[in-house]
Amino acid sequence: MSMRRRLSVVACFVLALALAASAAGQDPTTEKARVDQRIADLQAEIAEAKEQEGVLTSQLSEVVAELRAAQDAVDTAESSLSSLEAELATERDRLERITARLERQTQKLERLKREYRRAVGILEARVRAIYVTETPDVLSFIVSAASFSEIIDSFELMERVGIQDKKIAAQVKRSKLQAAAQRAATAKTRGVAVATVAVIEARTVEAREVRDELAAGRDTLAAARSLKRSAITDARETRAEYLEEVEALAAQSATLAAAIRDAQAAAAAGSTGTGVPSAAGFIWPVNGTVVSGFGIRWGRMHEGIDIAASTGTPIWAAAAGTVIYAGWLGGYGNLVVVDHGNGLATAYAHASSILVSVGQPVAQGETIALVGSTGNSSGPHLHFEVRVNGVAVDPLFYL
């Protein structure tokens, strides 16, 4: 609830109390007790809100410390991840260069193999030509040779084949072997690079997972911090709103207390017996002094006032109305109840005589009974009650 709305509620509450104490005829003593109880309840809620604010503040401090540590951990993990990603990028670039070099060396080796096959083909063609044209001794040597290499290595045959062809074949062979060796070395290096990249990739994935997990924990703490801050703000606003309401209610309680004191002072002087209606439109039902007020008495509720008067003193209707009860009623003794409309009724108890009957209309000031001491009574007096919708209220605020 916002501050403006809270103050609006307080204003309405105070206005309702004021209207109840005046126009609606509510009992100021009861209303003051209700106001004071509400103040006590609010003060308890203020103390609870203050305690809650302290707890939340302490929790917020812990969350902030945890969040700071979590952020440091995330920063460290982020730095480690950045280093690994940079290292991984470097190794991948190196692997790409090695792979490209290996591909070029493979192509070169294939080309040399083709050239070597062509050189060998040329030599084989020469040998076949020699086989056809040379003497039987040479032919028999060629036929009896164990391998083609033996033919090539033979000095006599090479003299016939030609020194140049042998040099070409040997050079191509050396180039092919050298290229094969280079390719093998590059392939080995590439294998090491592939393994290195795989290891760094695994470490990078692990570091990223750690970073993400730490970041999630940090985000959770950040959300908790926001909630704690919001809760603290709400607790402070609630406490401030309660304080505003307490101030308004305290002012109303003071007003009610003044009204009660004024009424009690008037009651202490007793009735003037002039029959002049009060501001509420009532007259005193008998001329006498109030000897017992409205409220708790002897551990139970005394729901009216007792006005001292001698036996036989006339009892007047406090306001015009209709008699709705006239007769004996337990501890009340002889009782007359007059209905004044709009849920308002008055009761006159312990009478020695009843002078009206049920259904009879009576005028204000009309004698309806005589003072007595019937029922639960220790001496002659009038027990006078005012009830609103059946609920007893303090009669002094009507007299």
Image (cartoon, rainbow, N blue to C red):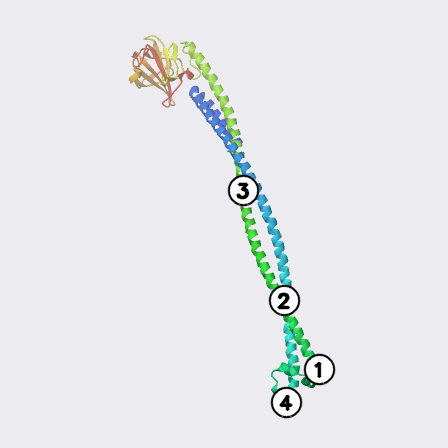
Amino acid bearing label 2: Ala
Left or right of 361? Residue 243 is: right
Q: Does the image show residue 314?
A: yes
Q: Nearer the viewer, residue 180 or 220?
A: 180
Which is nearer the N-term, disc 3 or disc 2? 2
Q: Which mark is residue 163?
A: 1
Mark 2: secondary structure: helix
- Looking at marks 2 and 1 on the same chain, the residue that comes earlier in the sequence is marked by 1
Three-letter code, disc 4: Leu
Residue type at the position of mark 1: Ile
Q: CA distance from mark 4 to mark 2?
A: 44 Å
Disc 3 packing (10 Å; few <14; some 14–19; many ≥20): many
Whole-percent x and y of residue 109? 64, 72
Q: Residue furthest right?
A: 164
Could you say where residue 103 lies in the image, as x and y percent from the top left? 63, 68
Q: Which residue is mark 2?
A: 185
The tag on residue 139 is 4
